[in-house]
Image: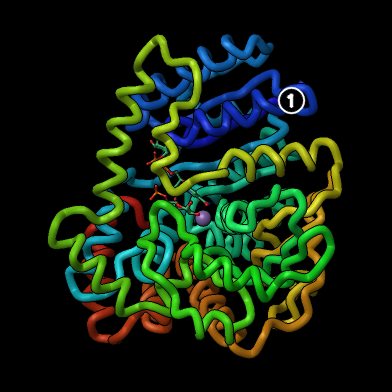
Amino acid sequence: GIKIVTIGGGSSYTPELIEGFIKRYDELPVKELWLVDIEKGREKLEIVSNLARRMVKKANIDMKIYSTLDRREALKDADFVTTQFRVGQLDARIKDEKIPLSHGLIGQETNGAGGLFKALRTIPVILDIIKDIQELCSDAWLINFTNPAGIVSEAVFRYTNFKRYIGLCNVPIGMKNNLAKLLEVDPSRIDMDFAGLNHMVYGLNVKLDGEDITGESIVKYIEGNITMKNIKDIEFNKEFIKALGVIPCPYHRYYYKSADMLKSELEEFKEGTIRGQVVKKLEEELFELYKDETLDIKPPQLEKRGGAYYSDAACNLINSIYNNKKDIQVVNTLNNGAISDFKDDEVVEVSCVITKEGPRPISMGYLPTAISGLVRQIKSFELLAAKAAVTGDYDTAYLALCINPLTSSDDVAKIVFDELIDAHSEYLIKK
Ligand code: NAD
Ligand code: G6P
Ligand code: MN
């Protein structure tokens, strides 16, 4: 039987994961699931674990749910480790969003200044987890969902010798499933290449039953105005996207519609309804539901979070590694020649064949001219952010912020940077 350890087990997303494992139990017999959290998450962990136990009982399968604050105890002999934690909880996210906005910069938890600081808080913890894995379950695969997934992945591959790491995001699977809905076909009939970086990924070469439908897919995609629950659905300019010739991800709104997104966020900021604040309320509602001892399924209210299809992404990946399926999934891994614009040792988000040895990236050639510069610029930002997180060198972190396309002034960036350093000091490593 398989042993899985989920770090950040108190997350409100955990029931998604449980549902995914229950659905796949025949192929993927998870016998032990260990949910791990920290003292601050004790109550959430307790509530989620009890719901998980009811879900497993209702499904009538043999999967034992453990909950613990002792990460090392949990990790012993694990086969897969998944990470979905938030250093500093939602209050830290709200600061990542509010502080940039209070100075007129976009406040987003995975892009720009907020994303940089989430990286600085998260990477030291991931590196600690990897040390524990290397000691306690060195053959385990680490599937990381913790954001900013791209920068975290870059740090892991660049600064550790741990190879059994995969960074994961629900954006590609969400784009494909939503496109399939618009085309009114089953997603399994669609093949679509993905290439780029996390939250900076593009869809290319869409095929339906093997026939190229990229052009009409782009039209459908912009007419359908596909987004995710956490990203305001401001429309892309149709002429622009048609000329672009590839499908942008929902997060590209921050880059191609910066002024519009900023305006909308500033309104939310005034009203006290920025995403972190909305999610805080949503989370309270979810946990009230989770506490109900008659609840034994994943409640549909969870769909209000941005993580739609999260469980499919995570469970499909684990399933394909375990069963050596060699199907195609989109993950964050070393480029190894797949996208010609990147070096072999840079992390990209790209379609891969998933084998028991891990993901094998599929060759994509060069990216179109219109997008190659932006993704390279974001990679420069990620490289500097990862370096700063590992070294604690805050000159490098400030440099990263200044070169980010969402930063409109180096001086404003300095003010925002200093405030964020102050706000998060308890979670930042000292040089
Ligand atoms: P959350 O605020 O509910 O945090 C999850 C749990 O992590 C909490 O119970 C918290 O106590 C715990 N935690 C904090 N520090 C920890 C540590 N050092 N060790 C173990 N546990 C710790 O967060 P959430 O909204 O459920 O999101 C969890 C993470 O997943 C975030 O980083 C978020 O950005 C990420 N996420 C990623 C994607 C993706 O596409 N990759 C999608 C959704 C969420
Ligand atoms: C999307 C992204 C995640 C992000 C999440 C936020 O699914 O892919 O990386 O963290 O949404 O959702 P939330 O409900 O927390 O705003
Ligand atoms: Mn994501």
Disc 1 packing (10 Å; few <14; some 14–19; many ≥20): some
Could you tell me which residue is drawn at 62 percent across and 62 percent down?
A: 159
Could you tell me which residue is drawn at 55 percent across and 42 percent down?
A: 83
Image height of 376 relative to 205, above or below: below
Most foreground residue, 355 or 183: 183
Mark 1 lies on residue: 2
Could you tell me which residue is drawn at 41 percent across and 25 percent down?
A: 45
Image height of 352 relative to 417, above or below: above
Residue 299: quarter of image: top left
Image quarter where the N terminus lies is top right
| Residue at disc 1, secondary structure | strand
Image quarter where the C terminus lies is bottom left
Residue 334: quarter of image: bottom right
Q: Is mark 1 within 8 Å of ligand 1?
A: no
- The reply to whether residue 221 is visible in this rendering is yes
Residue 66 position in % (x across, y down): 55, 18
Residue closest to the far left: 270
Residue 356 position in % (x across, y down): 84, 44
Residue 148 position in % (x across, y down): 48, 58
Residue 207 position in % (x across, y down): 77, 65
Does residue 317 appear to the left or right of 326 in the view shown?
left
Residue 20: quarter of image: top right
Picture colour scheme: rainbow
- The reply to whether residue 347 is visible in this rendering is no
Does residue 276 appear to the left or right of 350 in the view shown?
left
> Looking at numbered disc 1 in the image, what kind of residue is underneath it?
Ile
